[in-house]
Image: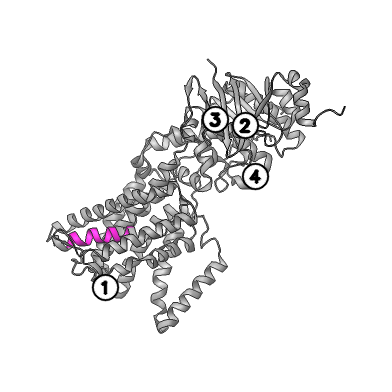
Amino acid sequence: MPLLEINNLSVQFGGLRALSGFNFTLERAELVGLIGPNGAGKTTAFNVVTGVHPPCTGEVRLEGRSIVGLKPFKINRLGIARTFQNIRLFGGLTVLENVLTAFNQSLTHGFWGTVLRTPRHQREDRHHEAQAMDLLHTMRLAHRWDELARNLPYGDQRRLEIARALATKPKVLLLDEPAAGMNPQEKMELMELIRFIRDRFNIGIWLIEHDMKLVMTICQRITVLDHGETIAVGTPSQVQCDPKVIEAYLGEPVS
Amino acid sequence: MTNGPMTALPSESRLSLAQPRVPVWVVNLGLTALLAVLWPIDRLMAEYMDPYFLRILVLIGINVMLAVSLNLINGITGQFSLGHAGFMAIGAYTTGTIMHYWRPEGPMIPVAIVALLILGGVFASAAGLVIGIPTLRLRGDYLAIATLGFGEIIYTLIINTEYIGPLRVGGASGLHGIPIVANFFWTYAGVVVCVVCVWRIAYSAKGMAFRAVREDEVAAAAMGIDTTYYKVSAFVIGAFFSGVAGGLFAMYQGNLDPAGFRFMRSFEIVVMVVLGGQGSITGSILAAAILTYLPEQLRFLSGVWRMIFYSILLIGMMLLRPGGLLGSRELWWTRRRIEPPRHPVAS
């Protein structure tokens, strides 16, 4: 049984077919890419999987369980975390607090625990703080733990989003253009980091990215979308040679 | 990526997590002691203090509760509500009508006060639950208008209700003859409970979720936070303390005028929250105190000039400190007390 399975997914916005007949599978510890020109429906696919948009038809299964129609927070709790193309950090919270918010679902104390500050509540806080700091170390953000998220440089904000997503202990991680706005050095580091995350946490990673070098280097499989249609699926080398892909990106050959 | 994240992650021991400077049980004990000390203070004040100033002090306490509870909704959770006077009215009228009918004597008085304050708070909470539901679909200006409408509904209901069964509500002419049993002690006991509750909710792991909802709802939901639950919770908890403040007001004033719970009252509370700094609890306390005391101090100005001067002061303060007196900070350090990692971190 695949970790994440999407069958025949279609999404329509008014008269626009954002996604049609989309199929996809993701296994544990797999790194798969989703590419395509702007407006191809990549982020729409992510939004449907995370419950932001309802699909018109089709099904999404996480470990065999259908998650269509569930609220975004429920889907996250079942094990799908994501980052956003336009960074959506909690700007007014510190770096550490951003990660701590993601532990919300594992809080065991209730209202009275909060108001009386019971020992259990405090132990839990310490435990989560330690876990959050560990994640920040992994993401090389630990030295900025007390800065406001909105004051971080762009590359750091992208990594903080990944840290926050990982704090929800996902089985599947969706990365929406994680390298956007990074310089070549940062992109190199990010590639290493993404591989490391996949191996260390043993999770499936599905990423949207425009940087072809990055995608071709780290992804095991790639899906190419254009105008909502899947035009190619395969290994990086297969996809690179596909005439349809070349056409979608570069236009028809001049004859 | 020199030694990189490839190094295995060590256990928690890497961090030095400082314990709070004062153990929590000591703080909890201290707060209980504070409540006990309030009683002799109240006796002394009633004996020696100018009743005029004592009255201002009590009104400050009631406004502090209103501002702090509204701050949980507006400042911390970011749901702009203009209906806070409505919750206050529900608490005030619940407590007032029952007290009017009950008229407890002797040792029953404190029992009645506590019971009715809680009842008033619970009724206001129920209204908070009802008004919390539109917030799931409305945000920003639209929510403000919906809550404004809620406040007016409460007002209209009150002025058109003379009696509920045997209980006199008073209708448009107001409710008079409520036994005056609240005083400095009861008010500030309420203030302590309210401020401690809201403070501990705001600065806790759960509080982080309220803030996350304010910062970015979509992201909060994507991080597994049940945004519905936290938004409605903010309304329920905020309305509870507003209802308690209303109950105290009823038992301190002895009479209730429905016109005193219209949108102007809501605006006054919003002004306190905004002036103090949205999200800052100490800011709300400070602003509630200043804005209750200031109009009294301006009494040397006659009639119209007093309110004009007061308004000019408000405009001036907002121009000087657009984010409110304290912004989103508190008077003292509230950040989590974690020491930064000791070993150098490769960047």
The chain identifier of the residue carrying mark 1 reads B
Residue B164 picture location, percent across and down: 18, 59
Which one is in front in this view, the residue at disc 1 or the one at disc 2?
2
Which residue type does callout 1 highlight?
A: Tyr
Q: Nearer the viewer, mark 2 or mark 4?
A: 2
Discs 1/4, front: 4
Mark toward the viewer: 3 or 2: 3
Answer few, some or many: residues within 10 Å of disc 2's Cα (few below 14, many 20 plus, some between 14 and 19): many
Residue bearing the label numbered 3: A49
Stretch of the chain drawn in magenta: B87-99
Q: Are marks 2 and 4 in contact (CB under 8 Å)?
A: no
- According to the picture, the residue beneath numbered tag 2 turns out to be A175
Where residue B48 is drawn, which disc sits there? 1
Q: Earlier in the sequence, mark 2 or mark 4?
A: 4
Residue A12 percent across, percent down from the top left:
57, 35
Q: Residue at x 32, y 73 (%)?
A: B53
